[in-house]
Image (cartoon, helix red, strand yellow):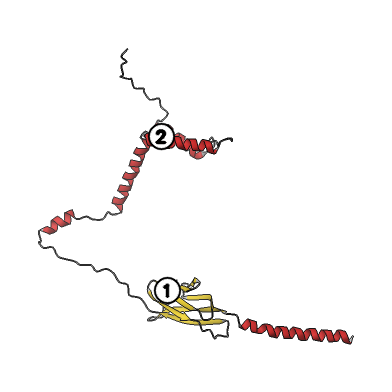
Amino acid sequence: MRKTLLAAVLLVLFGNISKLQAQPGKESNPYILFTGLVLTSDSLQAIPYVTIKTRKRGMIGYTDVYGYFEVVVKKGDTIYFTQVEQIPSYSIVPDTLTASKYSVVKLMVQDTISMDAIFIHAMPLKSLFNNEFVHSAIPDDAYERARKNLENEAMKDEYRLRPADANASQLYLAQSRVNRMYYYGQTPPQNYFSPSAWIQFFDAWKRGDYKKKPQRKSLYITPY
């Protein structure tokens, strides 16, 4: 009985010692939860969709519509904040933190967007204004672009109805041979129940592709 009690006490003591030895391992965890808000420096307004990245891992997250972010970083990392309309900024996570969470409020300064200069010159003569106004190249509006697109569609239909030339016939013959070799030794797929094949058939029938065309008489006269 005494031996059993002694073994139980020793087991409890060794368990406590192992727990005490495991606690320093938790404190040595290099990763922490990095949270905070990204605001404008002049009006303290939230900046949404700010890219958050590190030099080694690249992009690790971005802010939401309220400027809030929550990412996992390593102690001592340099966190970069970038946004199109703001000057890039960064924050350094202290490597002496003992807590598992670190929060900041990041203020970003609006960047100045530079544009190419535009120079406006007056006409040398007033009489040239009418000529320049009439003959100047004006960009097409939506109506003109739609009209040109419809002209392209009409040309496509015209090309589709034209007979194939030698190059197109050669390509069609080569593709037919490739299809036969692909299904060599097996039954090729049938298009009897294919909706697209029936649609093509009815379109060709409406166009009159299956009508009997009159044969041209040959004007060649044999010498015999």
Q: Position of residue 18 (x, y in %)?
A: 72, 83
Residue 164 seen = no
Q: Which mark is residue 169?
A: 2
Distance between the Cα atoms at labels 2 and 1? 57 Å
Image quadrant occupied by the N terminus: bottom right
Residue type (three-letter) at the residue carrying disc 1 = Thr
- What is the residue that sits farthest to the right in this orientation? 1
- Kindly indicate whether the residue at mark 1 contacts the one at mark 2 (C-beta within 8 angstroms): no
Quarter-wise, where is residue 157 in the image?
Answer: top left
Residue 143 percent coordinates (x, y) = 30, 51
Instruction: Give the residue displayed 34% in from the left and 22% down from the top.
Output: 216
Dot placed on the residue nearer the N-terminal end, 2 or 1: 1
Residue 158 % position (x, y) = 34, 38
Q: Residues within 10 Å of mark 1 (few under 14, many from 20)?
A: some
Q: Would you call the spot at circle 2 few (<14 residues within 10 Å), some (14-19), or many (20 or more)?
A: few
Kindly report which numbered mark, 2 or 1, lies closer to the viewer in this rendering. Answer: 2
Residue sitting at 53 percent across and 37 percent down?
181
Q: Quadrant of residue 24?
A: bottom right
Q: Secondary structure at mark 1?
A: strand
Q: Disc 1 marks which residue?
A: 82
